[in-house]
């Protein structure tokens, strides 16, 4: 087999390659495993600063914090329609750096909270967040084959979710032990978030190949922004995407429960410690479930994740109803955090893996649709969250996760079909 030169820019279209050509062994920097690890570490660093910032919104800024998160996710949702075009123009690496700067801007807006500034930073982060997460999804797909997408997705989310451990333990120490003021805390978060830029700058330029080592071409990269927008919207005609709307909605709404509703029950002193358990189980679960999905398939892991979610949310409600003293509830909240962390790990890894398998040639568009539906649901949840009771939130999340589990089973069947990129209804 004739080797193919891999030294191409991120935005350049690859020439047509016949099935007789194979991709030569990449250098370390262009290797898939290297890039997944570096990508995961970059997200870990960035979200070690942002996750505590988000969790503290409903505690420190209360209704203003909830409203700012609703604005953030609303703009993130809208921007996902054009983010695939931005990724194609800038390339994944530069897009990740641009997105990081908007996260840093939002953290900076919390140093001295001024309402118009915080809302403005929410809008900016909504736009940048769409770019960042679309680039992430596209990059993981670019680094993976059908047989490695589960393991690569699990490895990324395992590294990414370590941020919950580092960020929350660090926050707990800074608040509980050092007694730092909010201004100083967010200044530290700002500095940490900017460090992730160095990780993203160290990413290579992997070439997408299949399990046989043959290069997989991306779609026409010279399409106009109008055509690119239409190509993203038209994915909603695909049966797999239609089936995955409910799972993606659950993925979004559950985020508001994990990072909005649940932390509010803990109090500022315990957020860091309890959410560290959430992060540990999310990270470990992502690694284990990502690998297991390549061995046993995705369906059984989604069923387990559904059971974890129902158990965690119901236990959370029962604790609130049956135990009046919050100090007595705290030990049980660690169990809730573990169950919710495992639920989050299962659905995240399996959703990303399934979309990567079904749409290997449409990574940017598929990731854009994923984040559009997810962030729309998250925005809606942060809007109604302050007015909903804990029981309301548990019913919404529990009902949606059961429906999501069932529909995921049907959607997963499409992963076994050929020419799925052209499948529409």
Image: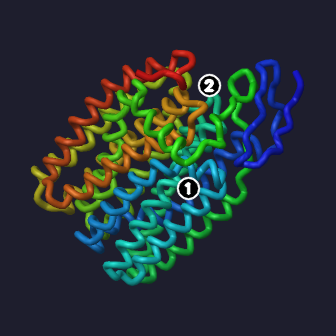
Q: Residue furthest top?
A: 417
Q: Secondary structure at mark 2?
A: loop
Can I make out residue 165 in this image? no
Left-right relation of 330 to 317: right
**Position above or below: 115 against 33:** below
Residue beneath the point at 77% across and 44% down:
30
* Colour approach in the figure: rainbow
Q: Nearer the viewer, residue 155 or 127?
A: 127
Instruction: Return the residue at label 2.
Output: 147
User: Quadrant where the C terminus lies?
Assistant: top left
Which of the 4 image quarters holds residue 22? Answer: top right
Within 10 Å of the Cα at label 1, are there few (<14), some (14-19), or many (20+) other Cα atoms?
Answer: many
Q: Secondary structure at mark 1?
A: helix
The image shows residue 195 at horizontal and vertical percentages of 62, 68
Instruction: Return the residue at label 1.
Output: 43
Residue beneath the point at 46% across and 25% down:
298
| Badge 2 or badge 1: first in the primary sequence | 1
Left-right relation of 199 to 70: right
Which of the 4 image quarters holds residue 98? Answer: bottom right
Left-right relation of 19 to 379: right
Q: Nearer the viewer, residue 72 or 324?
A: 72
């Amino acid at each position: 087999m004739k080797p193919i030169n891999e030294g191409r820019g991120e935005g350049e279209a690859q020439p047509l390659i016949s099935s007789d050509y194979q991709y030569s062994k990449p250098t370390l920097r262009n290797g898939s495993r290297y890039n997944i690890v570096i990508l995961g570490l970059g997200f870990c660093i960035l979200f070690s600063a942002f996750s505590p910032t988000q969790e503290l919104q409903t505690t420190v800024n209360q209704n203003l914090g909830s409203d700012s998160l609703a604005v953030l996710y609303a703009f993130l949702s809208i921007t996902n329609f054009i983010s695939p075009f931005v990724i194609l123009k800038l390339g994944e690496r530069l897009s990740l750096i641009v997105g990081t700067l908007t996260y840093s801007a939002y953290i900076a807006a919390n140093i001295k909270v001024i309402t118009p500034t915080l809302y403005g930073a929410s809008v900016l982060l909504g736009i940048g967040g769409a770019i960042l997460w679309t680039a992430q999804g596209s990059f993981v797909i670019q680094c993976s084959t059908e047989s490695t997408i589960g393991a690569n997705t699990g490895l990324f989310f395992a590294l990414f979710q370590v941020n919950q451990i580092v960020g929350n333990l660090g926050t707990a120490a800074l608040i509980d032990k050092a007694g730092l003021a909010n201004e100083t805390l967010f200044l530290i978060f700002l500095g940490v978030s900017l460090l992730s830029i160095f990780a993203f700058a160290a990413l290579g330029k992997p070439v997408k190949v299949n399990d046989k080592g043959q290069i997989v071409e991306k779609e026409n990269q010279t399409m106009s922004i109008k055509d690119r927008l239409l190509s993203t919207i038209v994915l909603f005609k695909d049966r797999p995407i239609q089936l995955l709307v409910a799972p993606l909605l659950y993925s979004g709404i559950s985020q508001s429960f994990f990072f909005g509703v649940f932390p509010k029950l803990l109090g500022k002193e315990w957020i860091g410690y309890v959410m560290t358990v959430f992060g540990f189980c999310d990270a470990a679960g992502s690694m284990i479930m990502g690998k297991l999905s390549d061995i046993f398939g995705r369906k059984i892991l989604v069923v387990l994740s559904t059971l974890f979610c129902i158990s965690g949310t119901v236990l959370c409600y029962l604790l609130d109803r049956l135990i009046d003293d919050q100090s007595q509830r705290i030990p049980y909240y660690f169990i809730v955090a573990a169950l919710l962390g495992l639920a989050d790990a299962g659905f995240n890894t399996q959703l990303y893996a399934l979309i990567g398998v079904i749409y290997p040639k449409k990574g940017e568009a598929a990731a854009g649709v994923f984040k559009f539906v997810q962030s729309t649901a998250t925005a809606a949840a942060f809007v109604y969250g302050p007015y909903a009771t804990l029981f309301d939130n548990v019913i919404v999340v529990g009902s949606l996760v059961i429906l999501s589990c069932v529909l995921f089973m049907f959607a997963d069947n499409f992963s076994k079909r050929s020419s799925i990129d052209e499948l529409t209804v």
